[in-house]
């Protein structure tokens, strides 16, 4: 019984980890995306299909360190200039991860 409980605990540990806290997002000229955490650590993020721009709301679907992270960014969460830059970047510069290994690539964009 102990091996079953241990394997369940290890399995749950991976699912119960908190999602990363994102303080800011860095948008690259070539479509790359990096997120900065509260400690200032930069992490590379893969933008996934299904990220959307809905007028004044942006939905970012990302894979960060192998985990799916979804963030909704309303217009009042950033300066008007920064929010406009994010919307423009998503429409024209962003590189979506559409690799066959990515199950989310079937969601379309």
Image (cartoon, rainbow, N blue to C red):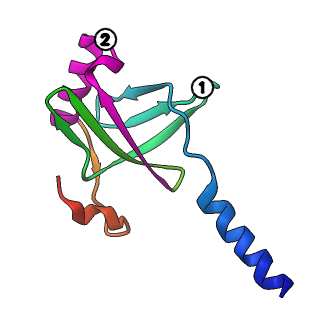
As drawn, 64 above or below 78:
below
Q: CA distance from mark 2 to mark 1?
A: 19 Å
The secondary element bearing badge 2 is classed as loop
Tell me the residue at 31%/62% (across/down): 104
User: Closest to the observer: 67 or 42?
Assistant: 67
Quick one: label 1, few (<14), some, or many (20+) residues within 10 Å?
Answer: few
Question: Which quadrant would the N terminus be assigned to in this image?
Answer: bottom right
Tell me the residue at 39%/47% (across/down): 62
Quick one: label 2, few (<14), some, or many (20+) residues within 10 Å?
Answer: few
Image position of 54 (left or right of 1): left
- Magenta residues, start to end: 67-93
The secondary element bearing badge 1 is classed as loop
**Mark 2, residue position:** 79
Could you tell me residue 10's position as x and y percent?
72, 69
**Mark 1, residue position:** 38
Q: Quadrant of residue 39?
A: top right
Tell me the residue at 18%/36% (across/down): 53
As drawn, 104 above or below 26:
below
User: Closest to the observer: 4 or 100?
Assistant: 4
Instruction: Check whether the beta carbons of the residues at disc 2 and disc 1 lie within 8 A of each other.
Output: no
Q: Going by the picture, which residue comes out furthest to the right?
A: 2
Could you tell me residue 75's position as x and y percent?
26, 21
Image position of 87 (left or right of 15): left
Q: Is residue 14 magenta?
A: no
Q: Is residue 78 magenta?
A: yes
Tell me the residue at 22%/61% (across/down): 107
């Amino acid at each position: 019984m102990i091996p079953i409980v241990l394997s369940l605990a290890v399995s749950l540990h991976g699912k119960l980890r908190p999602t990363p806290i994102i303080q800011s997002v860095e948008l690259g000229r070539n479509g790359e995306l990096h997120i900065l955490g509260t400690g200032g650590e930069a992490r590379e993020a893969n933008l996934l299909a299904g990220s959307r721009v809905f007028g004044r709301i942006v939905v970012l679907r990302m894979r960060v360190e192998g985990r799916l992270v979804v963030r909704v960014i309303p217009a009042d969460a950033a300066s008007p200039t920064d929010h406009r830059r994010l919307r423009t970047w998503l429409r024209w510069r962003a590189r979506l991860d559409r690799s066959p290994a990515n199950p989310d690539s079937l969601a379309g964009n």
